[in-house]
């Protein structure tokens, strides 16, 4: 039976509980002492970034820039923490001299993180480096995008001009979208024509979402873009993708929706069915609807259903959890909820729109608020923190699910989707499993070469997997049955070796058993400890959250699905639940 040690990491957490009312000085001194081994430094680094002052963050930046100071994983955690500090607390180092060295680092993730910080800190000290990276055609795609982001953050006429040179036809369309989006964030009034020209050159491959987001984020930005599109019509496929993005993030601004709908050939407003038509549709759901196809439609990324709605905790939480929805809701109710989502919205799911003094727009569900800040969860599940002092306007909205989302479904797709929802929670293949399973997983977005060739040792696992920040992971949700479709996950990462991470939380300590449907090709770690998979794998765990990390070799596994159940052994005192959410 595996029993994790308390160890230095937990002791450090316990000894820093008083930091909620003080600065991070004691932790900085502990880090400076050199007594913390590299694998235990990461918690100190994160706490310093969460609570430290400008001097504390300056020390973290200086150490990050010193190639001999932090291990690569700890440097990544430090740069993520510095970014979080400025976003959530508006705290940054007094001097940013170390950024130039980080932008010139040999590894791409460090360079990208440093460029993001340069934009957030408005650090013009690396303007020339960002300009060169943005204008050089063979700059790797992600690095070029980060350079454009840095220039946008720095602002100014010189940044606006640099981005303008990327709008020519010889520049790849994806980069043109980013450049036009960047100019829109600097000066939306001047960038409407840029955006219209880029959209006119659109196709069915390059997603204009970053460009549309740049205008939606600005006060009056949607109207500015709509006016520009009157003179330069967008490509039909680009317009369809732009509309899909708008609906996916809960926006349906009238003028822009109209301009895009006309080019996409999509009805401007969905026609609400009459009672007779609704009954015909409901009858069709029961007679010919296919729940298997319907579940695949629910999971489609372009529709964002799973981003907003969870099934038994696996999925988004900006709309109600749909566990058991079929057992309590007939087809006609489900159809109305999709075709007219604003008709019946519970108070806790009403969106709020916030406009800052700088003209930036935020739309989402309030999940936290105090005297200093408001935290919104937007339609894709991301949390946005707005300082109270920055708020200029605040108003209540309706549902984050726009009525026009159904325009992207054929009649057959709508019927199949509703049939799936109507079966969810009923006896049969879509009944909720009696045994709890880990349903919300995260998958490592990019798998480094060191993780592909074999089962990693403790140091590689710690640096490349356990220390990976939130941006390094993609969501991977189980189906209603509890099975994770590994073929979907592999398609998202492009790899046959996958790293998945789930979590369980104990409110009372004791024994918990993990039961794998099939252990072939799977390696398991509980926290940072490799653990042999048995039938079942019994763990003796303390209270709190525990990471379950899996390495899955799909070739060795020979199966495109995975299920991990949680069982309480006889006599166990444990109380536990799988961690859900987006």
Image: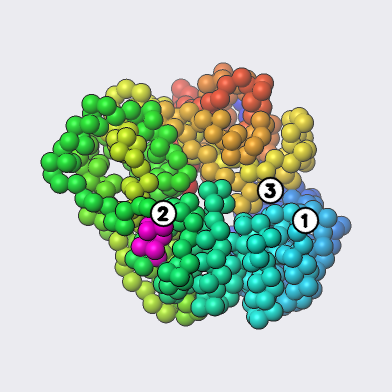
- Residue 138 shows which numbered tag? 1
* 425 in relation to 229, above or below: above
**Which of 76 and 343 lies nearest the eye of the viewer?**
343
User: Quick check: 502 left or right of 337?
Assistant: right
- Residue 225 shows which numbered tag? none
* Residue lying furthest right: 68
Instruction: Give the image quarter of residue 335.
Output: top left
Q: Residues within 10 Å of mark 3 (few under 14, many from 20)?
A: some
**Which of 508 and 480 lies nearest the eye of the viewer?**
480
Q: How crowded is mark 2: few (under 14 residues within 10 Å), some or many (20 or more)?
A: many
* 431 in relation to 263, above or below: above
Q: Give the range drawn in magenta.
A: 256-263
Give the foreground label among 1 and 3: 1
**Which of 144 and 556 lies nearest the eye of the viewer?**
144
> What residue is shown with label 3?
467
Contact flag, marks 3 and 2 (Cβ < 8 Å): no
Question: Which of the two labelled residues, at mark 3 and mark 2, occupies the earlier sequence position?
Answer: 2
């Amino acid at each position: 039976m595996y029993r994790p040690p308390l160890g230095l990491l937990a002791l450090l957490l316990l000894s820093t509980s008083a930091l909620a009312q003080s600065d991070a000085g004691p932790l900085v001194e502990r880090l400076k002492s050199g007594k913390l081994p590299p694998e235990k430094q990461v918690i100190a680094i994160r706490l310093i970034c969460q609570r430290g002052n400008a001097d504390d963050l300056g020390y973290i930046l200086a150490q990050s820039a010193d190639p001999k100071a932090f291990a690569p994983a700890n440097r990544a955690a430090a740069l993520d923490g510095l970014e979080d500090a400025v976003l959530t607390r508006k705290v940054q180092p007094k001097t940013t001299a170390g950024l130039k060295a980080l932008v010139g680092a040999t590894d791409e993730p460090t360079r990208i993180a440093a460029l993001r910080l340069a934009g957030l800190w408005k650090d013009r000290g690396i303007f020339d480096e960002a300009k060169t990276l943005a204008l050089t055609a063979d700059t790797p795609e992600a690095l070029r995008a980060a350079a454009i982001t840095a220039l946008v953050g720095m602002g100014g006429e010189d940044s606006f001009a640099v981005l303008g040179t990327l709008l020519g036809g010889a520049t790849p369309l994806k980069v043109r979208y980013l450049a036009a989006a960047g100019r829109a964030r600097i000066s939306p009034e001047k960038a409407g024509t840029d955006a219209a020209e880029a959209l006119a050159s659109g196709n069915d491959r390059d997603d204009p979402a970053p460009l549309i987001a740049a205008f939606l984020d600005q006060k009056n930005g949607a109207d500015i873009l709509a006016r520009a599109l009157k003179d330069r019509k967008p490509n039909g496929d680009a317009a369809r993708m732009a509309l899909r993005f708008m609906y996916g993030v809960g926006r349906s601004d009238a003028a822009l929706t109209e301009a895009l709908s006309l080019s996409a050939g999509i009805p401007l407003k969905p026609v609400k069915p009459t009672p007779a038509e609704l009954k015909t549709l409901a009858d069709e759901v029961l007679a010919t609807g296919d729940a298997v196809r319907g579940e695949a439609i629910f999971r489609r990324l372009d529709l964002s259903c799973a981003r907003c709605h969870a099934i038994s905790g696996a999925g988004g939480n900006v709309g109600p959890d749909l566990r058991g929805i079929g057992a309590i809701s007939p087809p006609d109710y489900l159809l109305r909820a999709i075709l007219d989502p604003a008709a019946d919205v519970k108070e806790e799911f009403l969106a709020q729109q916030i406009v800052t003094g700088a003209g930036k727009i935020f739309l989402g569900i309030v999940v936290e608020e105090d005297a200093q800040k408001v935290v919104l969860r937007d339609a894709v599940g991301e949390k946005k923190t707005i300082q109270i002092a920055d708020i200029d306007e605040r108003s209540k909205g309706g549902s984050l699910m726009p009525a026009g989302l159904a325009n992207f479904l054929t009649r057959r797709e709508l019927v199949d989707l509703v049939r799936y929802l109507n079966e969810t929670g009923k006896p049969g293949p879509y009944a909720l499993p009696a045994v709890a399973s880990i349903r919300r997983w995260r998958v490592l977005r990019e798998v480094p070469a060191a993780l592909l060739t074999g089962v990693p040792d403790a140091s590689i696992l710690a640096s490349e997997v356990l220390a990976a920040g939130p941006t390094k992971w993609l969501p991977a949700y189980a189906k209603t049955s509890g099975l994770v479709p590994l073929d979907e996950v592999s398609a998202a990462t492009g790899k046959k070796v996958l790293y998945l991470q789930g979590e369980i939380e104990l409110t009372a300590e004791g024994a918990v058993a993990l039961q794998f449907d099939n252990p072939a090709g799977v390696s398991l770690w509980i926290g940072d400890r490799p653990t042999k998979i048995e039938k079942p794998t019994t763990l003796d765990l303390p209270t709190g959250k525990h990471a379950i990390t899996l390495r899955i070799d799909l070739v060795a596994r020979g199966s495109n699905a995975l299920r991990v159940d949680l069982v309480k052994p006889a006599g166990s005192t444990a109380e536990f639940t799988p961690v859900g959410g987006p």
